[in-house]
Amino acid sequence: FKIDAIHLREINMPLAHPFRTSFGLTTQRRILLVEIESDGLTAWGECVAGEHPYFSEEMIDTAWTITEHELAPKLLGAELKGGGSCPDVFKQVRGNRMAKAALENAVWDLESQRQGVPLAQLLGGTREKIACGVSIGMQNSPELLMEKIETELAAGYQRIKLKCQPGTDTKIFEQVRERWPEILLSCDANSAYRMKDFDHIVDWDRFNLLMIEQPLWYDDFYFHSMLQKRLKTAICLDESIRNRRDALAAIDMESCRIVNIKVGRVGGFSEAIAIHNATAERGIPVWCGGMLETGIGRAHNVALSSLSNFRLPGDVSASARYWAEDVIEPAVTVSAEGEIVVPTTPGSGYEVRRDRIEKITVRRRTLIA
Ligand code: OSB
Ligand code: MG
């Protein structure tokens, strides 16, 4: 089949709660959405690139340009078998994986509608429910953080991940562990530490963390492997893993024992599935990361998380944690056991709220075959 039209839009949405990481504070999201049309069906994709090139080299404006001038024209000219055709269609374009993923994931969504099967099933998913954790940004005081953790645990979330950086780490972990000795607890540094901090990080072994996420440089494997050798606690790589080869290299040199899969970071569902399968074969557990997505990206994360090697709770949590009002219906909800039910209806299982999206659209462009 072919794609008849591609609509790009930028929507602006304020976060229900500001989110602070070691690379900055996010209060308002600017999000690129793509909508594709083919044979009377439509499907959506969300680009997870941020407002600034701080998590990765990509940002919404670079993703918009690459999508409009490079990826969309290639996709409009292509004869497709499904989402799996996209990596080949886009292969001339280097990098820009978040831009590629938005379009590729929309094609997978479209294909699941065409076949009349749930997206999760088309991806190879088998789980009926997925396990959910939360990522908690750095707070203005330890008291506020403790309150947040209390609220999320009461809501049923199965794992708490704390954003950290030098100065906002050991003391906090001590307090949290004192109050909650048994919970699944992890931390995410988003590359805030360097080699001089190795002794400092090794000291965290006493907190029995589930993992330490991306402590060192965003593009590093070697120094993470040096650090992992000294740690009992598992390192989890996020930023460093761009594709299946990166995952194989990281496993081979023991840079990590756990992998975070973000479908946007790796360029789309095809590569995410390839990483899932390669890690499964080597006994390395994965979990689904989040990028403060709207319901469109969140629904796709739910489908991906249904694959069997997603063995640890993901950063896939309820719409209400992020947005006063989401752009899909129904909103994503989490049970008291900290689980999301994987939809069993054709497509993603959620309806996109076009009326709501119209109201918050600030830029649009339509490209036709
Ligand atoms: O490193 O996992 C990360 C958000 C934005 C950019 C990077 C990260 C995150 C999160 C939030 O941790 C995950 C979420 O709840 O969507
Ligand atoms: Mg991370």
Image: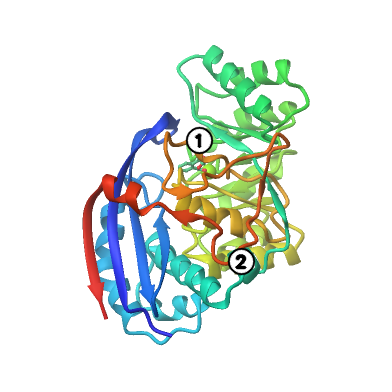
When the figure is inspected, residue 291 is found, relative to residue 5, above or below; the finding is above
Question: Of residues 290 and 53, which is closer to you in this image?
Answer: 290
Name the quadrant containing residue 325: top left
Question: Of residues 241 and 81, which is closer to you in this image?
Answer: 81
Q: Position of residue 25 (x, y in %)?
A: 37, 31
The quadrant the N terminus occupies is bottom left
Total tally of numbered discs in the picture = 2
Name the residue that disc number 2 marks: 118
Question: Of residues 52 and 32, which is closer to you in this image?
Answer: 32
Name the image colouring. Answer: rainbow
| Residue shown at 61% from the left, 71% from the top | 117
Q: Position of residue 130 (x, y in %)?
A: 68, 49
User: Could you tell which of marks 2 and 1 lies nearer the N-terminus?
Assistant: 2
Q: Secondary structure at mark 1?
A: helix
Question: Of residues 12 and 174, which is closer to you in this image?
Answer: 12
When the figure is inspected, residue 284 is found, relative to residue 140, above or below; the finding is below
Q: Quick check: 61 left or right of 237?
A: left
- Label 2 beta carbon within 8 A of ligand 1: no
Q: Position of residue 156 (x, y in %)?
A: 69, 32
Q: Is residue 219 visible?
A: no
Q: Amino acid at mark 1?
A: Ala
10 Å crowding of disc 2: few (<14), some (14-19), many (20+): many
| Residue shown at 28% from the left, 62% from the top | 8
Name the residue that disc number 1 marks: 320
When the figure is inspected, residue 361 is found, relative to residue 245, above or below; the finding is above
Q: Position of residue 270 (x, y in %)?
A: 54, 70
Q: Quick check: 46 left or right of 367?
A: right
- State the separation of the CA atoms marked 2 and 1: 24 Å
Q: Secondary structure at mark 2?
A: loop
Name the quadrant containing residue 125: bottom right
Q: Is residue 5 visible?
A: yes
